[in-house]
Image (cartoon, grey):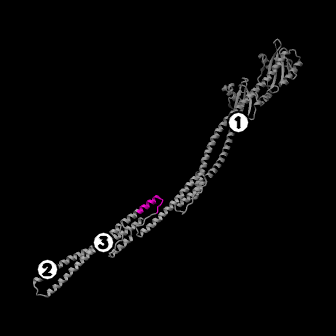
Amino acid sequence: MQSINSGKSVGISAKLTLWVGILVVLILAITSAISYFDSRNNTYELLKDTQLKTMQDVGAFFESYGMSKRNGIQILANELNKRPDMSDEELINLIKAFKEVNGYDLVYVGFDNTGKNYQSDDQILDLSKGYDTKNRPWYKAAKEAKKLIVTEPYKSANSGEVGLTYAAPFYDRNGNFRGVVGGDYDLAKFSTDVLAVGKSQNTYTVVLDPEGTILFRDDITKILTKTELSINIANAIKANPALIDPRNQDTLFTAKDHQGVDYAIMCNSAFNPLFRICTITENKVYTEAVNSILMKQVIVGIIAIIIALILIRFLISRSLSPLAAIQTGLTSFFDFINYKTKNVSTIEVKSNDEFGQISNAINENILATKRGLEQDNQAVKESVQTVSVVEGGNLTARITANPRNPQLIELKNVLNRLLDALQARVGSDMNEIQRVFNSYKSLDFTTEVKDANGAVEVTTNALGQEIIKMLKQSSDFANALANESGKLQTAVQSLTTSSNSQAQSLEETAAALEEITSSMQNVSVKTSDVITQSEEIKNVTGIIGDIADQINLLALNAAIEA
């Protein structure tokens, strides 16, 4: 029994822990889900803002860097406008100085009237050396544009290096065209200086043309080439020009490379419609960051759940510890009321919480039940004693003890009413009635029931009186018979005397015969009466025996009912 109760206590603790654990898991799951989605959105926005800031910084630096190069060439052109009479040495020294100051790889000046091209590497090229300045693309473009131009990136046929050229026309004081000043800039250096701003562990920046050709990239080997990724970027922009809308610079889209890897792309063409400055981040950076947050939340959540469940189990077990004492007390109490033990102990719970209140209430009821059972036991003992007295023939005994059980109270009242009915219908003492009946069986009708109150007692006494009366009548009949018999004897004697005297007359003989006949008739009548009275006495004796048997059966039934 104790082991079963202990199992139930553990079951309650486990169930409470399970339900609380489920509730904690749900709360943490909901909280983690909300936190996850918030973190994902925040991380997404943070990375997007970082990518946008990188793109804007690269664009601004690209514009600033390019502007410095353009300004350098324009300043040199303006200087040549002001100084048309410089010697060759002065011109070369001037362009050397500009080369060093502005970081060009090569600075040169081509004159329209002579066709000569003065370079910062001290070379002077002309037709005699097979160099036609006027037919150079940069020269022709600047002359036609009449302003500073920037060529498309190109790969040098001689050195294989990738670069671009800044070129600007210059004029004399009268505004006549004199030539073009230009400067070559190595794109490797440009990419290193400019695109380094937008390079990080997971993000890099490229500059593409509308067809997807890579114009600027920190990886020099990729410049002036197309990749699957750059083509997909260009195609995405062609399909949706809003991706480079200057009013929505934070528009993010995805594209795949030749390996099918997704990249998060953000492009801008605000600085030059022919250039797409794009920041490229592998898409897993977004997902890995969010997944990392999710994994941390899951790990922290699991640890928190385990710790919470341990604490909850400990607290629940500690809080439910009074149940063991309550169960022990209830087990003892149930054994007591099921008559397995003769004593019961109260529950020892000293807490002031609900368990303490429950144990106090149970203790009060245990003590009340114990007192009630003791009171009921006392009433039952007295009832048994009363039945024993009744079995002895005393019908005046009564149950006086008051039980606590309402059913026992009802039983007590029923038994007392039964005894009242027996006393009223039978009598007070069955032994006295039995004594009288035994006397009657012995044909002693001189006794009677003393202080007769019950119906059987009164009837017994009345029966005795009637029997006495009948016996007296029988006695009277017997006496009368004796008298008649005496008369008969006298008549016989007279007849004998008459027979001896044959001398009497016939009349006397006839008279005597008539007298004898009359006497014989009387004797016959008296004899019949005596026989009748004897039969009646015999019947009365049988009735008395039956009454005695009925009284014995009635007393036996009363004892059984008690």
Circle 1: is it few (<14), some (14-19), or many (20+) Cα within 10 Å?
some
* Nearer to us: label 1 or label 3: 3
Q: Residue beneath label 2, please?
A: 514
Residue 247, image quadrant: top right
Circle 3: is it few (<14), some (14-19), or many (20+) Cα within 10 Å?
some
Classify mark 1: helix, strand or loop: helix
Q: Position of residue 160 (x, y in %)?
A: 81, 27
Residue 447: in sight, yes or no? yes
Q: Residue beneath label 3, please?
A: 465
* Badge 1 amino acid: Val
Span of residues in magenta: 401-416
* Badge 2 amino acid: Glu
Classify mark 2: helix, strand or loop: helix
- 384 relative to 173 in the view: left or right: left
State how far apart marks 1 and 3 are (Cα).
129 Å
Characterize the magenta stretch by its predominant secondary structure.
helix
Q: Of marks 3 and 2, which one's residue comes earlier in the chain?
A: 3
Q: Of marks 1 and 2, which one's residue comes earlier in the chain?
A: 1
* Badge 3 amino acid: Gln
Q: Position of residue 310 (x, y in %)?
A: 65, 49
State how far apart marks 1 and 2 are (Cα).
164 Å
The answer to if 406 sits in the magenta stretch is: yes
| Quadrant that contains the N terminus | bottom right
Q: Position of residue 288 (x, y in %)?
A: 69, 38
Circle 2: is it few (<14), some (14-19), or many (20+) Cα within 10 Å?
few
